[in-house]
Amino acid sequence: MVKFQGKMDLYFCLFLILAFVEKLFVEGAIIGGNCTLPDIQNGLFLHLNADEPKIIRPNEIVYASCNKGYSLDGSPEIICRNGLWTPNLPVCQPKKCSVVSIPNGIITSNSSSTEPISHKTYIYIKCSPGFLLDGTSSLFCNFGKWSSEIPSCVPMHCQPDDVDNGILIHEGVVVQSSKKIPHEDTIMVSCINGYTVSTDFSHLTCQFGKWSSPFPSCEPEPCVPHKVPNGRVFYSGQDISAETKVHDSHTATVICGSDYILHGENALTCSKGVWSHDFPSCLPKFCSSQLVAQGEVLYFGKELQKETNIEHRSSVYISCKPGYVNIGSTKVTCSYGHWSQNFPTCVPSSCHAQTVLHGMVKYLEQKLINVCSTLSDGLVSHSHVVSIKCLEGFKLQGTDILTCKFGNWSDKFPECHPAKCDTEAVENGKVVDEEGTEIRTAVHSQQVLILCNNGYRLPRENAASMIKCYYGEWTYPFPACVPENCSANAVLNGQVSYNDSVVEFNMLDPKPLQVPHKQYVEVSCMNGFSTTDRTKVMCVSGKWLQRFPTCYPNSCQAYTVANGITHIIEQNSVLKEWGQLVPHGLSVNITCKIGHELSGPSNLKCLYGNWTGDFPECTPKSCPAIKVKNGKESYVDDEATSFVKHDMFLHISCDEGYQLDGASKIKCSQGFWCSPSPKCEPKQCLVKEVTGGTIQVNGKQLAVYDKPVDHLSIAVMKCHRSFVVNGIPKVQCLFGKWSSEFPTCNELVCEAPTIMNGKLKDVSSGKFVNAGDTVAANVSLTVECNPDHSLKGPPVVAKCDMAKWTNELQSCEKNTYCRELKVDKEVQVNYNGPLSEGSVAQFACKNDFCFKSNDEKAICGKNGQWIIGNIPTCDCGS
C-alpha cells in the first residue's frame, strides 16, 4: 500500500494517475481494460465486431492492412490487453522494390545494390562492352514497383558496311546495309559481275557488335592476257606471260615479230575482267601485187585490176596478152611479205626464123643458111626485117622481104623451088610425064619418059628411057627411039595376066614375060594384099607406061573412139578421122579423155588388113567415195563401195552437234563431183534477246538478237543497273548448245519488311503491300499504322534501290493510355489532353482545402502507369 507523506505527495500521485490515464486514452486504452481502434496512416485496422467497431475488448485481436503501394512494418496482429495494445502498433511504409540483377549489366544507385530499393529511389543501368541495353536506362521505384520493365543487356548487333558494287547476303537473302545483324550471325559479301572481293575474307561474323574482320571491298576483276602466236604481249614495259594478270583500266600492248603484221588493234584495255576487244593476231606479212604492162596478173583465177595485198604462201600467175611473151617466171609466191622472185615483163613476141631450103635468109646484114645455128634461139625481134634469096638452080616462090610483128611474120615464108627443065625433041618418039601426057617443061625431080613411036624402043646401049629434071638440068641426054618389047616379071604375093590368061612362071628359073609394044598386062594380088599402083599397065616401046605394080600387105581401117584418142604408135601421130587407113604391121594405142576410162584393149595391131582385136570404148569414170569428217555418207542409187558410178548420187548427213555446210546430195559426173565436197561444221548457237542487260559475243557488243553465233563463241552477259545476273555470266557455244543455261538479268528487288501493328503502302499506286512480298526496283513504300497505334518518329519514305531500301521504315507502337486517377473528392485533377503517354495531370484543391502533397502533377508513362509519388490529398483539419 502506498503511503502518502503530506499533501505534496498526494498531489504528485494524482498527477501520475492523470498522466497515466491520458496515456491510456492516447494509445486507445479505456477505463475498464477496453481499447479504442487506433488509426494507421496509409492503412487501416480491421475488427470483426460489427456492433461496436471502435471499441475493442480485452484480448480481442485487430488486423492491420496497408493501402496499395505500402507494406506493413511490424506485426499484422495486435491484441488489446488491459487497455493497451501489444505488441507495438505497426506502421505502413511505402513498398520497396526488389533488387535488380541484369546479366552483363552494371547498376548504379544511391543505396546498396544488395538490399531492396527504397521508394522514390532511382537506379541507372548500363551494359558491359559488347552489349546493348534493351529497355530504359533508368528505373524509378514507386511503391514497390519499378517505373518500367526491367531492361536486359543483349549482345550488340553489327551494322554492315555499304559495299560499292557488292551485295550483302544474310541467311541466303540479300539484305541492305541498314539491316542490323545479330550477334554470332554471319554475313557474306558477294560482288556483282565484273568485280571480285578484295580479300580472302568474304564471310564476316558479328561478335559483340564488332565484325570478325574488316569489310572487304569489291574491286574490278583483273584480266588474263591471251597467247599471241608470233607475237608478244607487253604490260608496264615488260613481256608478260599468260599467268600475269592485268589490273582494271590498265592497258596491254601486242607487238608482232619480224615478217609478221598485226591484224586488229594492238592496245587492249582491261575493264572489269573483260578485254576491251578481241586479242589481235600476228599473221605473215602481205605482199603487194604489181600490174604487168601488156599482161594479166591472176589471183585465184581472177585478174587483178589494181595493186592488191596477197596473203602469205599465196601465188599469183602472170600471162601475157596475145603478141607478147613472158620474160621471167610465170608464177611468183608471197613469203612473209617478200616475193619469191621479181615480177616478169611482157615484151612483144619474137618470130622464129625459118630455114628456107635451097635459099639464104638475110638478117642484120648476115646471111643465115641454117638460122638456128647462128641466131640466138632462132628468134627475130619484133619489127625487125629478114630477106630471102634462093641458091643457084632454085627459083623464089613468094615474098622476098618479111617483117616480124608481135610474133608473127608479115607474110608466109617463101620457098626456093628447083628450076624447071625444057624438054627436047625425040626422034621417033616423044617426051611424056608419068601419066602419059606429052609435056614441054618438067619440074625439078620430075621424071619424064621417052616414048618411042610404034615399033620403036630405046636402044639398050643408049641412056635410060627415064630422064629426070634436076635443078634445071636433065640428068641424061635425050635419046632416039628404036622399036622394043616390055619384060613382065613374076609379082610376089600376086599373079600376072596377059591376054586374059594367068602367066605361069617357072619359080626355079623365072624368065620375064616379053610384052610387045602397046600391049597390056594386069596384076592381081593375093588375099590380104593389094597394090597402091594401077593394076593394068601398058608396054610402050619397050617401057611400061606406069610403074609396074607390086603387092603390099593390106592396110586396116581405123576407127575413132568416142571420148577417146587413137595414137598410131610407130608414126607418133593421132588418128584424125574415122576410117583412116593404118598400114600393115603398125599398132594403135587408145587413151580416154579426162573423165572417162577404157573398156577393152588399149593396143591393137594391123595384120594384113585386120586388127588383132575389137576397138575398145571410153566410158565415163566413177567418182571416189567421199569421207565427210563428223558425218555419214549413204549411196542413194547404188550399193556402198569405194567408188560411185557416173550419174549416181551420194547423200551426206552430219553427226549430232554438227550442221551441213554444202549440198546434202551430190552427183558424180565423169569421175568428178558436180558440187564441192560438203563439210560438217559444228552447230551454231542462238542468242535470244535479253531484258535488263546487254550481251557481248567474243568481246563485241551484240546488236542483232535471234541470230546464230559460231561454235566456240563466248557470250558475256552484262546487266543494267537494278539488275543482277542469274546464272553463269560467261557461257560458250559448244556444238549448238551453250556450256550452261544461258544467263538472264533478274531485277534487283527488295523484300517488303514486316511492320508490327502497321501496313506498307505503295506511294505511287496507293496499294497495300504484304510483308515478305517482292517489291520491284524504284518502288517507294511508306507505313500506315493500325488503329490505336502510331508511328515511332516522323513519316519516312523508303525506295527499293539495288535490292536495298534507301531508308529504314519506322515501326508502329501501340498507343498507351493511363486510367483516370482516383483522388479524394476534395482534389481536382486537370488533364492536358488524352490520357496517352506523356500526358500530364495537374492537381489542385477544391474550395479552400489545403494541398497535402509534394507531388503537384503526375505523368502518364509508357506502360499506362502514372508516374507519381503519393496521391495528393486536400485537408486543412477541422
Image (cartoon, rainbow, N blue to C red):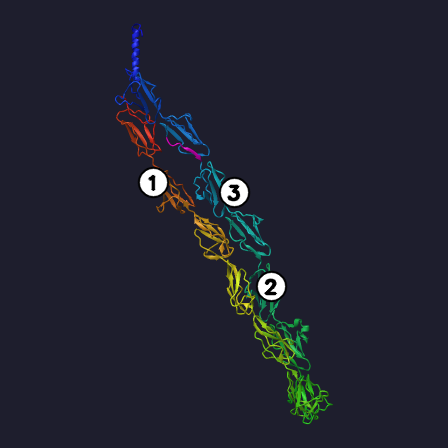
Residue closer to the observer: 97 or 797: 97
Crowd band around label 3 with a 10 angstrom C-alpha radius: few (<14), some (14–19), many (20+): few
Residue 176 seen: yes
Query: Which kind of residue does numbered mark 1 sit on?
Result: Asn
Residue at (30%, 13%) from the top-left corner? 19
Mark nearest the camera among 3 and 2 is 3
Image coordinates of residue 542 in percent, x first then y, are: 69, 91
Precedes in sequence: disc 1 or disc 3: 3
Residue 135 in which image quadrant: top left
Secondary structure type for disc 3: loop
**Left or right, residue 25 beside residue 222:** left
Q: Quadrant of the C terminus?
A: top left
Residue at (27%, 24%) from the top-left corner? 849
Precedes in sequence: disc 1 or disc 2: 2
Query: Which kind of residue does numbered mark 2 sit on?
Result: Val
Crowd band around label 1 with a 10 angstrom C-alpha radius: few (<14), some (14–19), many (20+): some
Crowd band around label 2 with a 10 angstrom C-alpha radius: few (<14), some (14–19), many (20+): many
Q: Is residue 521 magenta?
A: no
For residue 867, the mark is none
Up-down: is 772 above or below 82?
A: below
Precedes in sequence: disc 3 or disc 2: 3
Identify the residue position indicated by label 1 in the image: 786
Up-down: is 49 above or below 406?
A: above
Identify the residue position indicated by label 3 in the image: 200
Secondary structure type for disc 2: strand
Up-down: is 776 above or below 291?
A: above
Of all residues shown, which one is farthest toward the front? Answer: 59
Identify the residue position indicated by label 2 in the image: 332
Residue 422 seen: no
Magenta segment, which residues?
Answer: 147-155
Residue 580 in which image quadrant: bottom right
